Image (spheres, helix red, strand yellow):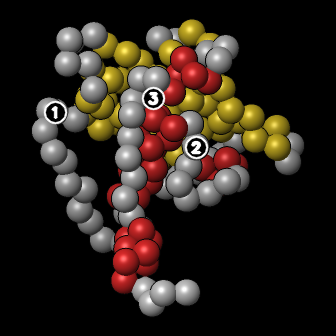
Amino acid sequence: MQVTRLRLRHFRNYNDQTLELSPGTHVFEGANAQGKTALLEAIYLGGTARSFRTHREADLIQWSQQSAELQMELCRDSGRQRQLRIDWKLQGAQCRREFFLQDLPVRRLSEFLSDLPVTLFTPDDLELVQCSPQ
């Protein structure tokens, strides 16, 4: 499974960004606060339906906006294409999210989650082997 296209609208520090990804390994490089971790977070969200950075989904919506959107296009080794989308909308103090697969609402989250298996390794994971025993 490969992510071939990623589109972020009002997600974290991205106003409207589309990223086309070719096959192979990708390296995101840049200065602090440029959105590298937000890209990884978006891909992780596409595979797990949750953020590794926050439990408050409203934090994913760009400051002063009322909604955000994540779109991903995936391609399996067989060539089969899949389209995932997550929409977030602020409704008063609450944040509501909706999942879509091939532009159809997802009834069971398990349908959405089976498309993109992901593994996350962050610098925080190194504490397990670098810090002193507790």
Query: Badge 3, how many Cα within 10 Å: few under 14, some, many 20+?
Result: many
Q: Position of residue 102 (x, y in %)?
A: 47, 11
89 displayed left or right of 26 = right
* Mark sitting earlier along the chain (1/3): 1
Distance from Cα at disc 3 to Cα at disc 2: 15 Å
Query: Tag 3, which secondary structure?
Result: strand
Q: Say what amino acid the circle numbered 3 marks.
A: Gln
Q: Say what amino acid the circle numbered 2 marks.
A: Arg
Verify CB contact (< 8 Å) between mark 1 and mark 3.
no
Query: Which quadrant would residue 24 be assigned to in this image?
Result: top left
Label at residue 22: 1
Depth check, mark 3 against mark 2: the one in front is 2
Distance from Cα at disc 1 to Cα at disc 2: 25 Å
87 displayed left or right of 5 = right
Can you identify the residue that label 3 sits on?
Answer: 71
Query: Tag 1, which secondary structure?
Result: loop
Q: Looking at this view, name the residue that lies furthest to the bottom.
A: 132
Q: Position of residue 63 (x, y in %)?
A: 63, 55
Query: Which quadrant would residue 122 be assigned to in this image?
Result: bottom left
Position above or below: 42 against 97: below
* Mark sitting earlier along the chain (3/2): 2
Can you identify the residue that label 2 sits on?
Answer: 50
Distance from Cα at disc 1 to Cα at disc 3: 16 Å
Q: Looking at this view, name the residue that lies furthest to the left.
A: 24
Query: Tag 2, which secondary structure?
Result: loop
Q: Looking at this view, name the residue that lies furthest to the front.
A: 133
- Of residues 78 and 127, the one nearer the viewer is 127
